[in-house]
Amino acid sequence: MIFLQKALAFIFALGILITFHEFGHYFIARLCGVRVLRFSIGIGRPIWSKKFANSETEWMISAIPLGGYVKFLDSREIDTSRMSDPELAGDFLKQSVWKRIAIVAAGPLFNFLLAIFVFWALFMHGTSDPVAKVRVASSHSTAFVAGVRHGDIIRKINDESVQSWSDMRWKILQAGLDRQEVRLLVERKNPDRPVSLNQIEIKLPLQQLTSSDFESDFLYKLGLEIFRPAAILSAVSPNGPADKAGLKAGDQILAIDSNPVLDSLAFKEIVNASPNKSLNLLVLGSGQEFELTITPEAALENGKQVGRVQVVPLSTIEMTELRYSMFDALLHASVRTWDTSVLTLKMIGKMLIGEVSWRNITGPITIADFAGQTAKNGWISYLQFIALISISLGVMNLLPIPVLDGGHLLYYSLEVLTGRPIPEKYVEMAQRGGLTVLLCLMLVAFFNDIIRQMS
């Protein structure tokens, strides 16, 4: 059932992306007067086709949902010797080079427009995201040494306002790829006046981040995590170790074995690491502090023995609602699409020069897995996934690799510069080379997918 859900989520998302991409080619081609003979979603053997009345286009769904294509009237592929002049006017090859550029570029452009539209709708509807309030667990971390403290709220990064945790992560990621130092403006509770806040500027160095760090949770490498609530128990199971020791709902764990407990996550980590080990707890309950001893019972989790005391600590993360007006939402959507496109190109460039591992290349198996996970998390996560994949598809198709749209744009750009088309024999050689590159990339992607599934 899980496999089926992932497959359906993947096929639906891919169908939308391919349809928009190919419709871009189709729409601009029709505006330019080019005859479109076939519009196919999917490749390979047709499983459905239809030609509507007063239309010369055959609409088709094919068996393999990993691509699609639009077939134009092209005298290089079809015998046009018996066609009349009005019919030949719709020949793709007879169009001006600028029209051909517009038709080819329209596919990736429509992918970017789809992403903008999805982000626009989401920003107007409103999305929830954790507040940019940080958990700093280690005094040896880069963030702590720089001056960031547990409970700080990040308000600005390099003078740009931070709206949420995801926004903070995005801004630090962009700066980190360029190995820049970031300036954080943080809000911190005033120890002398708890009702007021201090604003402090902190310089956070990112030079120590390696390329491999960006393949995992780079914020964790810096010592930054999402802020968690204090270790307050919201529920205690009857007859469990905690109940027998005297803990009650509402109690707060202040320290374990004389070591302060940072928050609910720290409490959980200490208990998990202490099966059958006696722990001395300092507890705040009913306005008074008291001590007690508890021994977590051993339990098997993922083949490993962990400690359990059968309590439910508070785990609610502070959230913020991001919602914008129609115009502001469109502006934010356009900026997000642009920034994501630039970041994607940077990552590709760093792969080519060896600064970022080729393990970041993902194939259909990993994408299907993400599709299933985001669909399971709700329609907002799923739409965000579709927007991000649409951007990736647009960027990838603009790469100057023969066979892709970017390769054709390269041919036509050279035609603009030289004033004459690239000889067909060179185009065919480039197409074969491009197809080889594409197949190699697909093999790398499938290999990475398999390794991820096995790990």
Image (cartoon, rainbow, N blue to C red):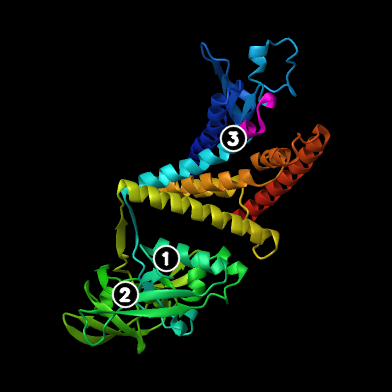
Q: Nearer the viewer, residue 257 or 90?
A: 90
| Amino acid at dot 2 | Pro
Q: Earlier in the sequence, mark 3 or mark 2?
A: 3
* Labels 2 and 1 touching (C-beta < 8 A): no
- Local crowd at mark 3 within 10 Å, few (<14), some, or many (≥20)? some
Residue 176 drawn at (x, y percent): 54, 69
Where residue 296 sits, quadrant-wise, is bottom left
- Nearest to viewer (mark 3 / mark 2): 3
Cα distance between the residues tagged 3 and 2? 70 Å
Q: CA distance from mark 1 to mark 3?
A: 37 Å
For label 2, the residue is 241
Describe the element under mark 1 as helix, strand or loop: helix
Percent coordinates x, y for residue 70 in the rendering: 61, 28
Mark 2 to mark 1 CA distance (whole Å): 40 Å
Give yes or no for residue 96 being in the magenta stretch.
Answer: yes
Could you say whether the residue bearing mark 2 is in a helix, strand or loop? Answer: helix
Side (left or right) of 439 relative to 251: right
Foreground: 6 or 124? 124
Residue identified by numbered label 3: 102
Label 1 amino acid? Answer: Met
Residue farthest toward the left in the current orientation of the protein: 286
Quadrant location of the C terminus in the rendered image:
bottom right
The residue depicted at 52 percent of the width and 33 percent of the height is: 19
The residue at 70%/62% (across/down) is 353
Circles 3, 2 touching at the beta carbon (< 8 Å): no
Q: Is residue 218 visible?
A: yes
